[in-house]
């Protein structure tokens, strides 16, 4: 009998492995059934995980840090994902970061992840939040793009594929990848309540095995057509936009890390950014190992490799 795991995510190309794994029965192969839930904001996702509304969250891993440090919820990062596909988009009338002085920029939560990327990029250009520009919360990328469509006063935001390609087509200006400004960045990953991981280690490892197999399948060139179709279907996208997003996700410079391995150096930069921009920990980032436990991942991968060679 399959065990059900509820998985909460933002709509986006970063979750193509989940769509592929469900479609191609990789989770079923490992005795699991997944229930994919879409969230509209990181706050809703963090609250939901803390309240036990689902077992696994996939999002920018800085949200896991925020849960530990701001909400005192004992969560742990157990799986990586992509290396940072977010890009800074502005209204068509804006040509540079400097022109955001006096403007309103929109974010999801104002004190995590992509909001910190945006604040850092603006700070590198001499602009400080509250003094030189206003920050307003507006939910996930899909919601922020719609807000910028509706109101030209919302001058800038960080977007994630496939919405980057929709924004470009509609004339919004792309000022560049976040990682080009701020350096290596561990973006999307999976995190869970630590007590749930301890009590359900075997199930978590089965999930990781299925996820890795699903990602391998989804990124294999031979499966591009089917994966693009799945993205189009699950995210309500034109096939052309889904194909652009898929190709971007396969770019190893910014897309998925092999087997969704956590980029520890990129994660250290996540913490350093949080320390600098939010002033946490007295401005000095703590040890990265405080927030992740890769023993589940390593064991899952070892079993997976053993099976493939057996």
Image: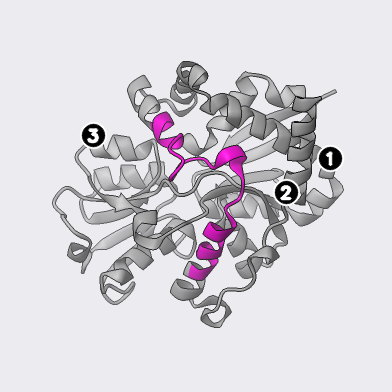
Q: Please tell me whether residue 84 is drawn above or below residue 19 in the rendered image.
A: below
Q: Which of the two discs, 3 and 2, labels the residue nearer the N terminus? A: 2
**Residue 169 bears which disc, if any?**
3
Name the residue at 43% across, 45% down. Answer: 253
Q: Please tell me whether residue 125 is drawn above or below residue 44 in the rendered image.
A: below
The answer for how far apart the CA atoms under marks 1 and 3 are is 45 Å
> Residue 28 at what x, y percent from top left?
74, 23
Q: Which of the two discs, 1 and 3, labels the residue nearer the N terminus? A: 3
Instruction: Specify whether residue 12 is in view.
Output: no
Q: Is residue 251 left or right of residue 24?
A: left
Instruction: Specify whether residue 173 is in view.
Output: yes
Name the residue at 49% across, 48% down. Answer: 83
Q: Which residue corresponds to mark 1? A: 202
**Kind of element beneath mark 2:** loop
**Kind of element beneath mark 1:** helix
Q: Quadrant of the C terminus?
A: top right
Mark 1 residue crowding within 10 angstroms, few (<14) / some (14–19) / many (20+): some
């Amino acid at each position: 009998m399959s065990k059900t795991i509820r998985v909460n995510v933002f709509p986006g190309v970063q979750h193509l492995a989940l769509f592929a794994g469900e479609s191609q029965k990789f989770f079923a192969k490992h005795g699991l059934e997944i229930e994919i839930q879409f969230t509209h904001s990181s706050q809703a996702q963090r609250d939901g995980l803390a309240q036990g509304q689902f077992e696994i969250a996939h999002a920018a891993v800085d949200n896991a840090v925020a849960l530990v440090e701001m909400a005192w919820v004992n969560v742990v990062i157990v799986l990586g994902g992509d290396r940072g596909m977010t890009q800074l988009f502005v209204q068509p009338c804006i040509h540079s970061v400097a022109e955001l002085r006096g403007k309103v920029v929109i974010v999801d939560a104002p004190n995590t992840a992509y909001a910190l990327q945006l604040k850092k990029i603006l700070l590198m250009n001499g602009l400080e939040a509250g003094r030189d520009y206003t920050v307003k919360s507006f939910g996930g990328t899909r919601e922020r793009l719609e807000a910028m469509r509706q109101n030209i006063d919302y001058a800038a935001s960080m977007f994630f594929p496939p919405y980057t390609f929709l924004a470009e087509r509609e004339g919004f200006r792309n000022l560049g990848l976040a990682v080009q400004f701020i350096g290596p960045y561990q973006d999307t990953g999976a995190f869970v309540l630590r007590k749930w991981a301890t009590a359900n280690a075997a199930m978590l490892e089965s999930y990781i095995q299925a996820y890795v197999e699903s990602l391998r399948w989804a990124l294999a060139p031979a499966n591009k057509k089917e994966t693009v179709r799945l993205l189009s279907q699950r995210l309500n996208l034109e096939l052309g936009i889904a194909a652009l997003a898929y190709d971007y996700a396969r770019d190893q410079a910014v897309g998925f890390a092999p087997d969704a391995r956590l980029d520890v150096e990129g994660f250290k930069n996540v913490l350093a950014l949080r320390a600098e921009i939010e002033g946490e920990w007295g401005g000095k980032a703590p040890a990265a190992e405080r927030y992740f436990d890769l023993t589940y991942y390593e064991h899952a991968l070892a079993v997976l490799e053993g099976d493939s060679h057996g």
